Amino acid sequence: GAGVSQSPSNKVTEKGKDVELRCDPISGHTALYWYRQSLGQGLEFLIYFQGNSAPDKSGLPSDRFSAERTGGSVSTLTIQRTQQEDSAVYLCASSLQGAQRGEQYFGPGTRLTVT
Amino acid sequence: GDSVTQMEGPVTLSEEAFLTINCTYTATGYPSLFWYVQYPGEGLQLLLKATKADDKGSNKGFEATYRKETTSFHLEKGSVQVSDSAVYFCALKPGGTSYGKLTFGQGTILTVHP
């Protein structure tokens, strides 16, 4: 079956613009995670969704970052007024359940470049 | 807070050489430990995992043993292949949590030459 998909695969934007990154999880996966992979910081957790709610947003770096999930499926990560330090690969992962043993399946990522 | 430290790379080996990538962690309680692999142009994939002390995870000839006394989860393979060239990430999930928030190491780039 289809894996986790993300779009766009690459995004180049000018500093100060807003961007939206999309994640389509594996069908039936109730848990969804966003991570960021950057040169300086490695791979960092951003936010966790269980269904449509986000019980853990502790990794969002600033209030310019927000995310939502609708219908228990697609999620959108929005970055407002982008800065150069936002340049990174944004990864989405989903799992069958939020419980301890649910393996996370990762998407290919969106490479964001802020010029 | 929780953290994972991996040996610095990149690591370059010849085919059939022995591989060790060191990983140590800091966490309270009893975390679960993972190795993920990212092949060129692909997404992260789970390679192996261990959920309690002394557990050994294994997959595709790779092994790692959860050592609580040394807070380590070193990745080993007896004979690497060119196809093992990838970036390897050690990660932990805190114990006692109901969801899979992962803390990753910095990643180690492995290149295997024929």
Image (spheres, helix red, strand yellow):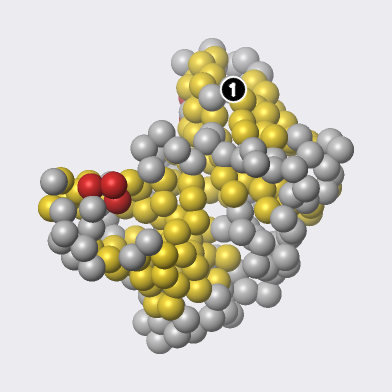
Where is A59 relative to B66, above or below?
A: above
Please state the horizontal and vertical placement of residue B75, each as a whole percent of the image: 33, 67
Identified at 62% across, 33% down, the residue is A5
Please state the horizontal and vertical placement of residue A25, each as a whole percent of the image: 69, 40
Please state the horizontal and vertical placement of residue A86, each as a whole percent of the image: 53, 30
Residue under circle 1?
A: A8
Of the pair A39 and B99, the residue shown nearer to us? B99
Where is A63 relative to A93, above or below?
A: above
Asked which secondary structure carries label 1, the reply is loop
Please state the horizontal and vertical placement of residue B90, each as a whole percent of the image: 42, 60
Q: Amino acid at mark 1?
A: Pro
Identified at 49% across, 41% down, the residue is B43
Q: Which chain is indicated by disc 1?
A: A
Tell which residue pokes out farthest to the right in this image. A71
Categorize mark 1 by other alpha carbons within 10 Å: few (<14), some (14-19), many (20+): some
Of the pair A87 and B45, the residue shown nearer to us? B45
Where is A74 relative to A60, above or below?
A: above
Q: Tell me if A52 is positioned left or right of A21 in this view.
A: right
Where is A66 relative to B6, above or below?
A: above
Identified at 34% across, 61% down, the residue is B6
Residue A60 visible? The answer is: no
Residue B59 visible? The answer is: yes
Q: What number of labels is visible?
A: 1
Tell which residue pokes out farthest to the front in this image. A1
Q: Tell me if A20 is positioned left or right of B106 in this view.
A: right
Identified at 35% across, 65% down, the residue is B62
Q: Where is the N terminus of chain B found, in terms of image quarters?
A: bottom right
Snapshot quadrant of residue A60: top right
